[in-house]
Image (spheres, rainbow, N blue to C red):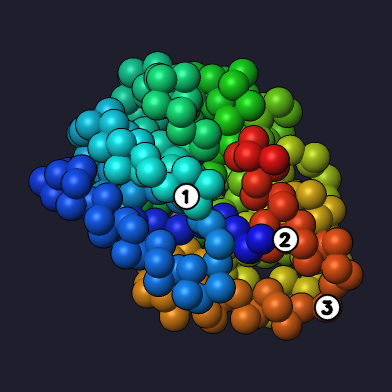
Amino acid sequence: MVIDAHIHFTMPLSAGVDEARRAMGEELELIAEAGVDGATGSLIDPLYSNCDAHSQYNDFFAETSKGFEGRFWPWCVVNPVNHDAADEVRRCYEVLGMKALKLHPWMQGFSCSDDYCNPVFEVCAELGMPINLHDGSPPYASTPACGEVARRYPEAKVVLAHAGLNDQWRQARDLACELPNVYLTMSGPSMLAMQSIVDSVPAERLMYGSDYGAGGVSLIHYRLHKIQQLEMDDRTRKMVLGETALRLLGAK
Ligand SMILES: [Zn+2]
């Protein structure tokens, strides 16, 4: 089973749940035609720094995702600068059933090392809720800064959603080798980088992800093809292409 561990949808609140659900169904159909059985990800809109409606977006996205169980697992989004962000994360997990969080320090304009983020990381660590961090874009979203969250919170599951992109993949690889709570989604690094990552990091913490939504279905074809060209044994391939993501989501 192939799971894309990093996708995005663009759905304005004004679309309404029925229209958004129809659009999601169509997009998941296109994704399936590209060879992907299931996916997990967030909305783009609440990742902008001027968003002040995270709870509405989380309600909307959780509701829109209903009916796609087993095919799509929605992530919630908060901005840690908001004082109620940690409570909102807990609500998303416990009430809305959203099993992972997405943070984008660069787009959202915050630094993971600032103390105001701590309550969000603490609640994720307590709940065992994966934190998907956009990484590889210094300064706010540098891979070392994102990885530091995993060092400070050993109970937290920290996903570096781009495995360092092209400039910081070595740091991503080394962090994942050093810290057992660092997971890598290989959305972006070169073939050379991905082969080195696959050769070094346990498969239980490696995932395929396309970042679909930052581009069209061609991104899925392109990044899936890259993963398929890597040299790895069958078990590793199975983990990277879906098992790791399912385990992380608690779906397995
Ligand atoms: Zn992303």
In the current view of this chain or complex, which residue is farthest to the front? Answer: 67
**Mark 2 → mark 3, Cα distance in angstroms:** 12 Å
**In which of the image's four quarters is ligand 1 placed?**
bottom left
How many other residues sit within 10 Å of disc 1, few (<14), some (14-19) or many (≥20)? many
Q: Secondary structure at mark 2?
A: helix
Tell me which residue sits at (56%, 73%) in the image. 35
Name the spot of residue 114 as percent of width and height, x first. Answer: 48, 30
Name the kind of residue labelled 3 in the image: Glu
112 in relation to 106, above or below: above
Q: Secondary structure at mark 3?
A: loop
Name the kind of residue labelled 2 in the image: Val
How many other residues sit within 10 Å of disc 3, few (<14), some (14-19) or many (≥20)? few
Tell me which residue sits at (42%, 47%) in the image. 68
Q: Quadrant of residue 53?
A: top left
Q: Quadrant of residue 180?
A: top right
| Total marks placed | 3
220 in relation to 142, above or below: below
| Residue under label 3 | 231
Name the spot of residue 186 as percent of width and height, x first. Answer: 63, 64
Sequence-earlier tag: 2 or 1: 1
Name the spot of residue 1 as percent of width and height, x first. Answer: 66, 61
Q: Secondary structure at mark 1?
A: strand
Q: Is residue 249 visible?
A: yes
| Residue under label 1 | 72
| Residue under label 2 | 240
